[in-house]
Image (spheres, rainbow, N blue to C red):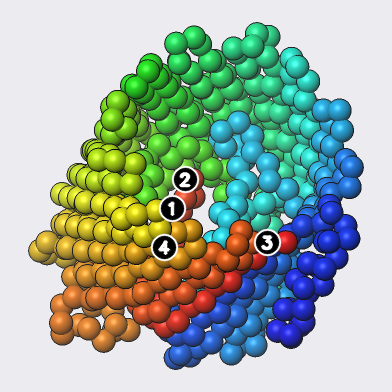
Amino acid sequence: MSLRILFIIPVIILNASSLVAQLSGSNLLESQFGDTPFGDLDNRSVVYNQINLSYRHNDIWIQSRYELFLSPDPDRSYTELTQLRLQYRRDGFTLKVGNLYETLGRGLLLRSYEIPGSLYEDLGYRSRYSFFRDLEGISFEYRADLFDIKFLRGRPLLNILPPDEDKQIRRPDQLEAGQLKFRPYHFIEIGTAYMSTITEDEKQGFGSLQLDIVLPGGVQLYSEYATGLGEEHNPLGFEKSDAFAYYGGLSWFYGAFGASVERKHYNHFRMGISGFNDPPSLVKEHSYALLNRSTHVLETSNETGWQMEGYYQFRSGSRMTLNYTIAKNDLSKSFRYHEWFGEYLHRFSPGRNLKVFGDFARDDLKLETNRITGGIIARHQINHLWGTGIDLQYQQLERLPVHEGIIRNYYTSVSVSYAPALSFSLLYEHANDPNQVDDPRTREIETGFRQWLGFSGSWQYKTNHSFLLFVGKRRGGPSCTSGICYEILDFEGVEIRYTTKF
């Protein structure tokens, strides 16, 4: 499909939607000109496009996604229909066929997800595609006052592979599952689920029990236990050879105060080749660039731990948050992860605030110790149109015994906004991390550090059109959203993104 046709399709749909009110959709177009790590083409020019269409008629809903990637290397280009779903809903009944998003409990057995607007590029395949994990199959659900029941069957997606890969390779696992939730009283819900999986002709069974209680006074308790079933498993065993997963959480809020305590214990509980389950990680998810990039990634083969958090909301609107996280992995030897985090947001006025944070962590799996991170973020609304912001972050750590010395990371962002449609940011990062500096691709071995300087701008036209521009160098690394982490590649060049809804 040519680019001309690619641009014509949204226009045709837009005109048709004026005649058929139930038709809607969105289009994401992104073009890059520049370099990425380990690329065999310098200054490559690539184009990615994603069209999402949705049609509703009474009780029927049809959704589809079409993705296109154009690269100088034709072997990496593709045009694929990546999602198609038919849904029928009436009187508590829901039937879905095609590409589904389904979750059992809190994800101990199964969790599907999508990170809207995210694009993934694997170092090996060098194609770009939307980042999601769905289930291709069929599901049936019935919701009543006292109970919910669900049945599903399908193949989960191995989402690190590009859309033009063979379907049997992208969806190597097959599963069948059922879930029942019973509500004897309005404040309590009891659930159970069973799942059967087939991976490489090996069949396994799993079950889970769930308990969700909401009490007066802002108290909520959730507990879920999942285990392997069959002769090779002991459902009540907690030995190193057993497959099980436990998650429990207790939260409480009263007025301006709130607190939560969570517990996890996972052992041999990665599902299938695609890893289609995703239990709660119990690791603080940060919006700060340096902390989000250096987060601890859950290891479902063996991990135990706790997370505790508390906050207090002051009458002025200011807020204080404290968090403590600990995780332990018993693999070839014992590894620990500790994190202490504190944050304070002070509101001077509705348009002026200052946020400060501090974090201390140790991550044995990454060989990182004494990791200290801190930052100051200030926002100032000059008038009803203009606003400014500055974000300063610093991090230092030791990585032993691989490297010696203090590793330092600096992050700076200065932004200006013009309400309601324009914003501009200047981003600068500086690091002496040997993993970055000693890479021959960087041509910066002699300097002992790397720098990333970039400019980004956004323009929102009305409510349906948005433009994003990035020029310069952007640092990659892990990025985590809603407990889902994936790798973003370094980039140097020009990137333009246009998103529209119709």
Q: Name the foreground residue: 215 vs 414.
A: 414
Hey, which quadrant is residue 26 in on the image?
bottom right
Measured in 3D between alpha carbons, the distance from the residue under mark 3 to the one under mark 2, in whole angstroms, is: 27 Å
Kindly check if marks 4 and 3 are in contact, taking CB atoms under 8 A apart as contact. no
Kindly check if marks 3 and 1 are in contact, taking CB atoms under 8 A apart as contact. no
Residue 293: where, in percent of width, then height? 34, 57
Kindly check if marks 3 and 2 are in contact, taking CB atoms under 8 A apart as contact. no
Kindly check if marks 2 and 1 are in contact, taking CB atoms under 8 A apart as contact. yes
Residue 12: where, in percent of width, then height? 82, 72
Q: Can you see residue 470? A: yes
Q: Secondary structure at mark 2?
A: loop
User: Which badge, 4 or 3, is on the more N-terminal residue?
Assistant: 4
Quarter of the N terminus within the rendering: bottom right
- The residue under label 4 is 418
- The residue under label 1 is 480
Q: Is residue 374 left or right of residue 282?
A: left
Q: Name the foreground residue: 243 vs 381.
A: 381
Q: Secondary structure at mark 4?
A: strand
Q: Is residue 68 left or right of residue 56?
A: left
